[in-house]
Image (cartoon, helix red, strand yellow):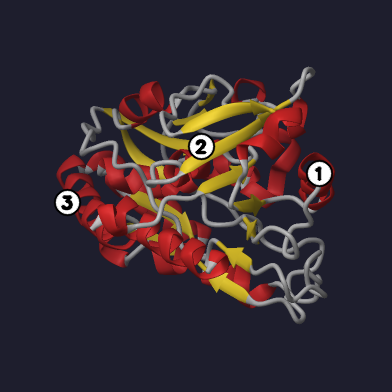
């Protein structure tokens, strides 16, 4: 099947590492710009092992002849035109991947590309497509796909685990303020950028320990030793860490907001807006490891069926073929 796919040269920036890890597993050639000072516009691979992707100095991009550009930030439209001498959506096919929920307003925030009809907005969840004011822009939805880490779950450590980048700064957005509620039922370990700087704003019954930021190869087996995954986000797009936890076979306790309501079936753990119900289920899983194992197996099966890598890549192959036709 893959031999029939027309391979394209794709220009994109390293913005969201986990999403890009899945995206570059496709059959295409992926160019990631580098500039002398790195930074947000030219960080290249950042040491990632992506065999199909290569770093290209910005001045050399025109000679590499990309067929399509995958935009993820509004500023990349101007950068593409300046670096390639080609206008996205006009001189070179382009799509814009929207990773985030709208801000500041949930239902009335207008998308930066809402007035353009030549660049499709590709939302990573149906929820985001619903909530953004997309204006006249054509839209698509390509749900997440995960590189399967395998059924790593052991649950030997009776702790909860949460993956939250910058939990202090992002606060209520990521539900960091809810961690003390869960810590009344049992210990909670927090991974992510800035996690070791997390300090609860109010007392908790059990320790909340900031572990730090790990590479996926080390993170997945480490988190899989914990008993339960906690997904506390109030207003972020569907976190890839939630889907990764389901893939490794962890039971999940999740706040029922944004796309989580479609991603977490009841048999995979618990999903609710009632924090008391969630903390009660967390307590139950901590003390009933056999129940946790069964929920984790159900969650893994669901995640493989709905968020598998092959399905994700097929959708992207189809979309790239459409926009470059």
Q: Is 86 situated above or below 114?
A: above
- Please report the residue visible at 80 percent of the width from the left and 68 percent of the height from the top: 105
Residue nearest the observer in this picture, 229 or 122 = 122
Viewer-nearest of discs 1 and 3: 1
Residue at the limit of the structure toward the front, as seen here: 63
Report if the CB atoms under discs 1 and 2 are less than 8 Å apart.
no
Q: Is residue 202 visible?
A: no
With 250 as the anchor, is 117 left or right in this view? right
- Please report the residue visible at 38 percent of the width from the left and 43 percent of the height from the top: 244
Please name the residue that numbered disc 2 is placed on: 163
Q: Kindly report the distance in space between the C-alpha atoms of the residues bearing marks 1 and 3.
A: 49 Å
With 259 as the anchor, is 310 left or right in this view? left
- Please report the residue visible at 56 percent of the width from the left and 46 percent of the height from the top: 10
Query: What is the x, y in percent for residue 200?
Result: 65, 32
Q: Is 149 situated above or below 6?
A: above
With 261 as the anchor, is 194 left or right in this view? right
Please name the residue that numbered disc 1 is placed on: 79
Q: Please tell me the numbered disc located at residue 218.
A: none
- Please report the residue visible at 74 percent of the width from the left and 30 percent of the height from the top: 58
To which quarter of the image does residue 44 belong? Answer: top right
Query: What is the x, y in percent for residue 157?
Result: 29, 26
Q: Is 52 situated above or below 256?
A: above
Viewer-nearest of discs 2 and 3: 2
To which quarter of the image does residue 299 belong? Answer: bottom left
Count numbered badges in the picture: 3
Q: Is 243 situated above or below 206?
A: below
With 249 as the anchor, is 142 left or right in this view? right
Which secondary structure lies at badge 3?
Answer: helix
Please name the residue that numbered disc 3 is placed on: 294
Query: What is the x, y in percent for residue 109?
Result: 80, 70
Which secondary structure lies at badge 1?
Answer: helix
Of the 4 image quadrants, the one containing the N terminus is: bottom left
């Amino acid at each position: 099947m893959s031999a029939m796919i027309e391979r394209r040269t794709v220009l994109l920036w390293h913005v969201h590492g986990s999403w890009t890890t899945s995206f570059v597993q496709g059959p295409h050639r992926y160019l990631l710009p580098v500039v002398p000072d790195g930074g947000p516009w030219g960080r290249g691979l950042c040491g990632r092992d992506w065999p199909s992707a290569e770093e290209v100095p910005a001045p050399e991009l025109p000679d590499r002849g990309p067929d399509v550009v995958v935009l993820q930030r509004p500023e990349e439209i101007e950068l593409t035109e300046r670096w390639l001498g080609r206008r996205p959506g006009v001189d070179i096919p382009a799509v814009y991947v929207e990773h985030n929920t709208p801000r500041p307003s949930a239902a009335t925030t207008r998308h930066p590309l809402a007035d353009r009809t030549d660049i499709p907005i590709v939302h990573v969840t149906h929820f985001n497509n619903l909530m953004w004011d997309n204006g006249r822009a054509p839209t698509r939805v390509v749900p997440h796909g995960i590189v399967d880490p395998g059924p790593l779950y052991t649950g030997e450590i009776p702790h909860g685990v949460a993956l939250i980048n910058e939990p202090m700064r992002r606060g209520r957005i990521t539900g960091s303020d809810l961690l003390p509620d869960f810590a009344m039922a049992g210990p909670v370990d927090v991974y992510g950028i800035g996690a070791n700087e997390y300090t609860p704003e109010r007392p908790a019954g059990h320790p909340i320990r900031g572990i730090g930021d790990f590479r996926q190869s080390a993170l997945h087996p480490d988190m899989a030793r914990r008993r339960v995954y906690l997904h506390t986000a109030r207003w972020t797009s569907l976190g890839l860490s939630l889907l990764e936890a389901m893939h490794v076979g962890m039971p999940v306790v999740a706040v029922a907001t944004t796309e989580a309501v479609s991603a977490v079936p009841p048999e995979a753990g618990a999903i609710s807006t009632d924090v008391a119900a969630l903390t009660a289920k967390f307590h139950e899983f901590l003390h009933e490891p056999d129940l946790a194992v069964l929920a984790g197996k159900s969650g893994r099966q669901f995640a493989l069926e709905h968020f598998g890598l092959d399905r994700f890549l097929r959708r992207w192959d189809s979309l790239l073929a459409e926009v470059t036709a």
